[in-house]
């Protein structure tokens, strides 16, 4: 019989496995670390529009600034 030492890697591996099994027993399925849904940047997001992020127009609109008359 060998006298095997338990390394830190072995301990972490066993702990992760036990934690995962406990999570599955609690919730009935594995739960990810980031449960939020990945959203595409291209889709319309009303909150972003309201936050003031400017919408990029597909064309350029020149703005003409006229100087006012100064009566002296």
Image (spheres, rainbow, N blue to C red):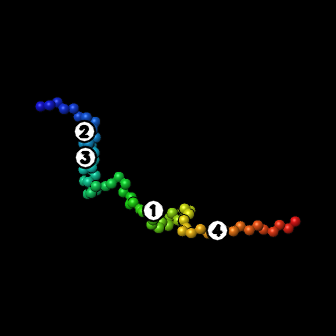
Element assignment for label 2 = helix
First in sequence: mark 3 vs mark 1: 3
Residue at 66% over, 68% down:
63
Residue 29 point in image, percent of width and height? 27, 57
- Check disc 4: other Cα within 10 Å, few if <14, some if 14-19, many if 20+: few
Q: Residue at x 21, y 32 (%)?
A: 5
Q: Nearer the viewer, residue 21 or 34?
A: 34
In the picture of the structure, the residue carrying the numbered disc 3 is 17
SS class, disc 4: loop
Q: Earlier in the sequence, mark 4 or mark 2?
A: 2
Task: Indicate which disc, 4 or 1, sits on the residue closer to the N terminus.
Answer: 1
Above or below, 69 against 28 in this view is below
In this rendered view, identify the residue nearer to me: 53 or 22. 53
Question: Which of the 4 quarters of the picture holds residue 1?
Answer: top left
Which residue, given by chain and number where applicable, does mark 1 sit on?
41
Q: Which residue is at the far top? A: 3
Mark 4–mark 1 contact, CB under 8 Å? no
Q: Position of residue 3 (x, y in %)?
A: 17, 30
Q: Secondary structure at mark 1?
A: loop
Question: How many angstroms separate mark 1 from mark 2 (CA)?
Answer: 41 Å
Q: Earlier in the sequence, mark 4 or mark 3?
A: 3
Tell me the CA gap for discs 4 and 3. Answer: 62 Å
- On the rendered structure, is 63 left or right of 39? right
Give the spatial CA distance, label 4 vs label 1: 28 Å
State the separation of the CA atoms marked 4 and 2. 67 Å
Q: Is residue 14 left or right of residue 65?
A: left
Q: Which mark is residue 62?
A: 4
Q: Can you say whether 4 is above or below 66 in the image? A: above
Callout 3 secondary element: helix
């Amino acid at each position: 019989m060998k006298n095997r030492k338990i390394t830190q890697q072995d301990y972490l591996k066993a702990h992760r496995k036990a934690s995962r099994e406990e999570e599955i027993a609690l919730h009935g399925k594995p739960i990810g670390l980031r449960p939020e849904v990945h959203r595409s940047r291209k889709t319309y997001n009303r909150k972003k529009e309201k936050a003031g992020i400017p919408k990029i127009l597909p064309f350029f609109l020149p703005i003409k600034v006229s100087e006012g008359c100064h009566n002296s």
